[in-house]
Amino acid sequence: MKRAVRYVVPVAAIAAAAGAGLWAGQTGLLQLPLGERLNVAKPATPEPTGPIIYYRDPDGKPLFSDTPKTTETGKAYLPVREGEDVSFNTAPAMPAAPVDGERRIKFYRNPMGLPDTSPTPKKDQMGMDYIPVYEGEDSDDGSIKISLGKIQRTGVETAIVGKHPITRLIQAPGVVAVDERRVAVVSPKFDGYVVKVGNVTTGTHVKEGDVLATVFGQAVLDQAARLLIEQNSGWTRSDEAASPPGLKGPAGVVGAARRLQNLGVPEEFIDQVKTERRVPDTFTIRAPISGDVLERDWSDGQGFKAGDVGFRIVDHSMVWMMANVAEDDIASVKPEQRVTVTMRAYPGRVFEGRVKVIYPHLMKETRTAQVRIEMQNPDMALLPDMYGEVAIATGGNADAVAVPASAVIDSGTRQVVLLDLGDGRYEPREVKLGKTGDGFREVLSGLSEGDHVVVNGNFLIDAESNLQSALKGFEAPSPIISSDTKASQ
């Protein structure tokens, strides 16, 4: 019995010591010497090699950059080298030879668009698979290859380049003004006074021949009396040969009749003197045109001097619309272009006219030029100083090779369209553009009639083109050579 106890106690002590040592090693209370620690340490990870392909967030966030940068807290992004990117293949292998009818994979590109390629399948830091690039998807002719499935998903649409009238509506504010050629002023050429003013006031519409006023003028009466004397005596003036035949009386008298006409006396008064063979005390002044009286400056019994304005009459059957066109648009405006005008006073009603005169100077305060538009006004709806919105239809005189405006990718310094080559291949084509209008842009060079261009989805294709252009600047990395192979060499 004692012998059994003698063997059991040492065994229990050894077991207890082993357990204590294991516990101390796990908790870190027991530290091995440096040499022993080196013997049990894990194999060291080799330093990453190769060029830096991108930079990742130092805090492990899914943020990447192809250039050095820092976080908002000032930490620098960590470089990721070519040999450091995650790969789940135990040994790199070249792409397998393609089976008949299958496309051959040339290399794999980074799914985030970073400038990194690989000859074998791999994953990036976020665990996303690299995207395969097949033969034929990249070409050296500047075109871009898009799969038919992606074309359908992105809604790519094309249109045929053809000839279209390039029309553009220029919008401008305008104000109604009177036609200067349709203004008549009643202003006697002799001194006198007003005996009686007719039933005419400012704003009254008069017709040609309506009585405006009855006046007295001593100079008129003197010439009328001389006309009777010349007619009765048969005296002929020396300037008879220079007088028009219509001014000659029965006896060839022309002097007094000519003076009466020069004084503005109507033919009605001259004929009355000749017929009645007497001189009336007064005569009547009638409206020279049909229109509206803008000014009435005479009253009964009022005296006047030669040249004083008695009435001002305006014909409003045709008016001007004075449009203020911006400096950038004035080059497109030409005479006889069709114009439509909408007035605030008549919502929904459209008035028509044509451009007649483009004034040869700008108003420096507004940087606009005045354009005169003639408009018929038979119902007198358009009144002077009314405001209106003018739309001038410019261009459209001849068809031009044009593309829809949505087909143009304009960077500000160059304009590009995507030419559809067929079979999912597109070529970026730089073009020179001309006029713009009515949803089209004139093409001066770069395209021909009948070409097919992308009008919808072109920005997605352009982004894909920029990505593939960037990838072409990086050659696919060569396979990694194992240490055993290096040792054998």
Image (tube, rainbow, N blue to C red):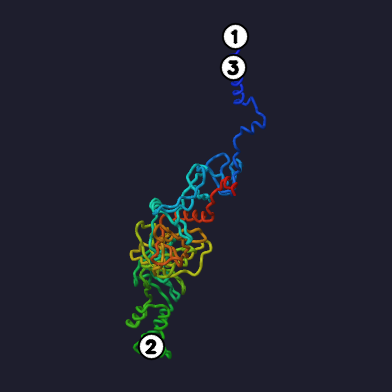
In the image, 83 versus 326, the foreground residue is: 83
Query: For residue 375, which quarter of the picture?
Result: bottom left
Q: Is residue 376 above or below residue 471?
A: below
Position in image of residue 225 (x %, y %): 39, 82
Q: Say which mark, if any, is on residue 2.
A: 1
Position in image of residue 231 (x %, y %): 36, 87
In the image, 85 versus 182, the foreground residue is: 85
Q: For the residues marked 1 and 3, what is the alpha-carbon distance in whole angstroms?
A: 15 Å
SS state under label 3: helix
Position in image of residue 335 (x %, y %): 42, 70
* Residue under label 2: 253
Query: For residue 32, which quarter of the picture?
Result: top right
Q: Is residue 120 above or below residue 59?
A: below
Amino acid on which disc 1 is placed: Lys
Left or right side of 219 for 27? right
Q: Say which mark, if any, is on residue 11.
A: 3
Q: Is residue 415 above or below residue 13?
A: below
**As drawn, which residue projects farthest toward the left?**
275
* Mark sitting earlier along the chain (1/3): 1
Left or right side of 166 for 124? right
- Foreground mark, 2 or 3, reads 3
